[in-house]
Amino acid sequence: MKVITCFSYKGGAGRTTAAANIATALASITPNVGSIEHPLGCKVALIDLDVFSAGTHRVFEISNEQLGSHSPWIQEYMREEMSPREYADQGGITLDNPLMDQFRMARGAADNCHPSFTLFPAKPDPDIRFVVQKQHENVLVELLMELESKERSFDYVILDGESGTRQMADIAIRLADVVLMFFRLTWQHIEGSLVAADDFERKNAQASYYKPFYLIPTCVPLVLGDQNVYRDDAPGLAELVELTSSIPEKSYLNRYAQEHQKGPGHFWAEDSGSANRLCVHDSLYLKGEERVIVFDAAANVDQAASDFYRIAVELNRLHQPSS
């Protein structure tokens, strides 16, 4: 089993939407549906570890009110109110759960997503009293061991972690086999992400085990009208595209990616093979909805859908779980 943590140095990078779409693309079982060319057929669990700003359930079109009927949440498990086995049995939302009706029926998951796909949500409560402690890392390790057990045998666990350098974000990174670092093409996102990348490299150099991580630009205005994302005559579009396109070169991003093509820069460096300049393009289908689109035929005209699928394909190629 491989644990993939989705991380962003700053909020607003589209991390949660990317985590959900990559997770479901990995769980695809039907070819030529939506953006899925060849199904990956993996057993996938997705855990929301953004315990203070829970939102992964919203990408599956489950409202906060609807989720109120579900329990236990990941926060309850981390308070050690139950065993890993009990939580794995009771805390997950599987495809046959009524809460997944919209995702299963309207978004095509019923026939196209592995039936074992499971979402472990966090409680969306801004007033929640939850203090992250070192022991929570050990409790989560026990849960990962349960999900890897012969009884459950998940191939991937995707952790939707916090943004920034808070304690839960650090725990999610330490638990990972692979880290995906999402960021927007703005100065603050790029510079902060590159600082984090340098810190990752320093820690990797000091560790006995190298932890792969990848920089993935997301929600970027680089798509033109012929790709059906923006109107050709949208006011300010040309200036915005020109400005955004210049930031990677003016910043350290392009050079860093070229120098780390076989690692952090794989999804952005120009000479990185099949992942050539891969980023999650800004998407009309995601604006205001932030939902899973990889099985959606209508969203297939949107570049973001194929981007999510291609990222999943590359991850499965580079880090396929051992049998």
Image: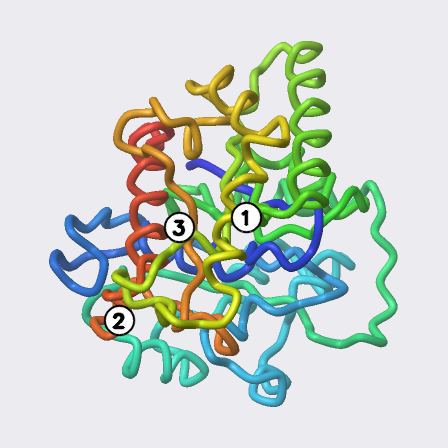
Q: Is residue 7 above or below residue 206?
A: below
Q: Residues within 10 Å of mark 3 (few under 14, many from 20)?
A: few
Q: Amino acid at mark 1?
A: Thr
Q: How is the image coloured?
A: rainbow
Mark on residue 296? 2
Q: Amino acid at mark 3?
A: Arg
Task: Tell me which residue sits at (32%, 36%) in the image.
Answer: 314
**224 with respect to 213 (left or right):** left
For the residues marked 2 and 1, what is the alpha-carbon distance in whole angstroms? 28 Å
The answer to whether the residues at label 2 and label 1 have Cβ atoms under 8 Å apart is no
**112 with respect to 122 (left or right):** left
Q: Earlier in the sequence, mark 1 or mark 3?
A: 3
The answer to whether the residues at label 3 and label 2 have Cβ atoms under 8 Å apart is no
State which mark lies toward you, 3 or 2.
Answer: 2
Q: Circle 3 sits on which residue?
A: 152
Q: Circle 1 sits on which residue?
A: 244
Mark on residue 304? none
| Image position, residue 291 (x, y; %) | 44, 71
Q: Secondary structure at mark 3?
A: loop
Task: Tell me which residue sits at (35%, 67%) in the image.
Answer: 229
Q: Secondary structure at mark 1?
A: helix
State which mark lies toward you, 2 or 1.
Answer: 1
